Amino acid sequence: MSSDKTNKPYRSLVDVYVESRRPVQENVQIIGVPDGMDQEQLGMVSDKEYQRLKRLVLSKAEGGTESLVKQLLRLGQWEEIAEIDTLVLEIFLEHEIDVQVLNKLVEKKKSGNLGNLKSCINKGNVWNLMDAVDPLARKLTKNFKQLFMDLTYKVQPKISTVSVGPGEISLSMFTNATKGEVGDLMLDGMELEIKGDGGRLGSSDYTKSIFTTPGNKYLNILADRGQGQHFSQAEIIQIRAQLGLKATTALDKFQKVKQVVNKNKQDLENLVGPVNQVIQSYETLKDTKTSIDPELIKTNITSAIDVIDQDTRVPLTKLIIGLNQTIVALLDQLTNTTDQNTDYNWQTSTQYMFNHDWGMTPREMAEAFVEMRTEQMDPGAVASLISAAEKIFKNTDLTKSLLNLKAAQKGKTKTIAQVELQRLQAALMATSYQSAHGFERIIVLNSKTLAASNIKFNPQHDAGQTLLSVYRQLKQNQNIHVSNPGVDQRNKGIGISVTS
């Protein structure tokens, strides 16, 4: 494309991309001819890149995509921050936008008649974020869902004055929601808190102080029981319990090997020692109360099994080999675990408390449990929480199930009782979190499916009533489940996620 003879060294972008009527195919050559100089090649662009450049130029026009996108952001009460505006516009420029539709969406936003978010958040089960979007938005571009998903999960910048989470931008652009004051979004005066996959329920800073705060009933109870009773030391006890169960099974299966060797002592005399070495090691591991050197036992087992396995006359089955590999892996895990670990892990510590029957009354259990909330609360609210938790712990079926787990199950989350306990943990965290900030809904999002679900808070409830209400909601709506916190890999709290 040659230039006109003007004072400019090259043709303007408007000349090249807007006024030109020549069809442009893929691998377009962009060339320029500076005044008085030979033609030079500036580069190659694909048709896709060309179309995007064209959209960029056209978006700058008055009433174009850029100004309308910014209007939607300002109507959603988002400050004019370059990082946010640029990121949102970049996503829009990936699509062929119908500017007339975009303009109508702006007008609907101005009139307070955009989208269906209010009806969605009043549902009791799972809904989809796309259900909340104004139907007109689907005409904005051919692949509106992709644009919406990108706005939902790609626009999450961490800026000094603004922190943007999943769904905040997308919902505020295509519904009546605006940026919230205490929650993430506001809708008709209702504050909404948005949580993505594994969103943490509350502050990690407060949970850190629980370990160091004097007078914590749970920690005092642990201290009275001496070494090995700290919640972060529970892992050693659990590994020994698993080793005991695996060693018991392996010992039983290994009897066939012993019988073959004993029956053919003359021919297999060199295997008598290794067989006895394996049996003795399994016997030691079977008794979980004995003091062991995991590295030494591992060496004894592996060296003996290697010798036995070389003789094809001895039936080392796949089951025995598999059990032995599991035992060796657990011994490695035990070697790398220290009883000096004092990292605070809220979820593990609470499960450990209920996995051991220390003769605590439901009231004592409730008091210890409530101290592990994630936010500071006034004494009246704490007392209300304790009374509510006590009612739950008086449920003999739940408490009995928690206290009667087999040794190897303790600290696990697969049993019905442990799932219930996790729900109770999430309810306590959500309650203290809501108490500190005052939002009326938590919306939980799924990044892959756009599924969403709600936890509702009644402004008329006190802390105890809120705890019981949230606990009931989590039991009834099993699409919301407890998970490790996606935003805090140190696992200082609990996260929630939603499935569809």
Image: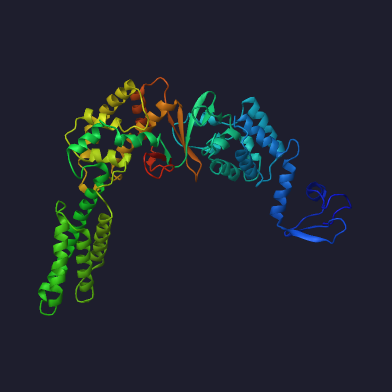
Residue lying at 51% horizontally and 38% vertically, measured from the top left: 165
Farthest-out residue, right: 5
Residue 67 in percent (x, y) is at 70, 36
Count of numbered marks? 0
Q: Relative to residue 71, is residue 488 depicted above or below?
A: below
Q: What residue do we see at 24% from left, 38% from top?
A: 353
Task: Locate residue 170 relative to residue 245 in the image: left or right.
Answer: right
Q: Is residue 426 left or right of residue 280?
A: right
Q: Quadrant of the C terminus?
A: top left
Q: Horizontal and vertical percent for residue 12?
A: 80, 48
As rendered, which of 397 and 185 lies closer to the eye?
185
Q: Nearer the viewer, residue 78 or 392?
A: 78
- Taking the image as shown, residue 337 lies to the left or right of residue 289, namely right
* Residue 122 position within the rendered picture, expressed as x and y whole percent measured from the top left: 48, 28
> Looking at the picture, does residue 499 appear above or below residue 291?
above
Q: Where, quadrant-wise, is the N terminus in this rendering?
A: bottom right
> In screen coordinates, is 99 left or right of 243?
right
Residue situated in front as seen by the camera: 299 or 96: 299
Q: Position of residue 188 (x, y in %)?
A: 54, 24
Q: Quadrant of residue 199?
A: top left
| Colouring method of the image | rainbow
Q: Is residue 50 visible?
A: yes
View extreme (bottom): residue:
267
Which residue corresponds to the image point at 88% horizontal and 50% vertical from the top-left? 6
Q: Quadrant of residue 359?
A: top left
User: Looking at the image, can residue 476 be seen?
Assistant: no
Q: Nearer the viewer, residue 331 or 439?
A: 331
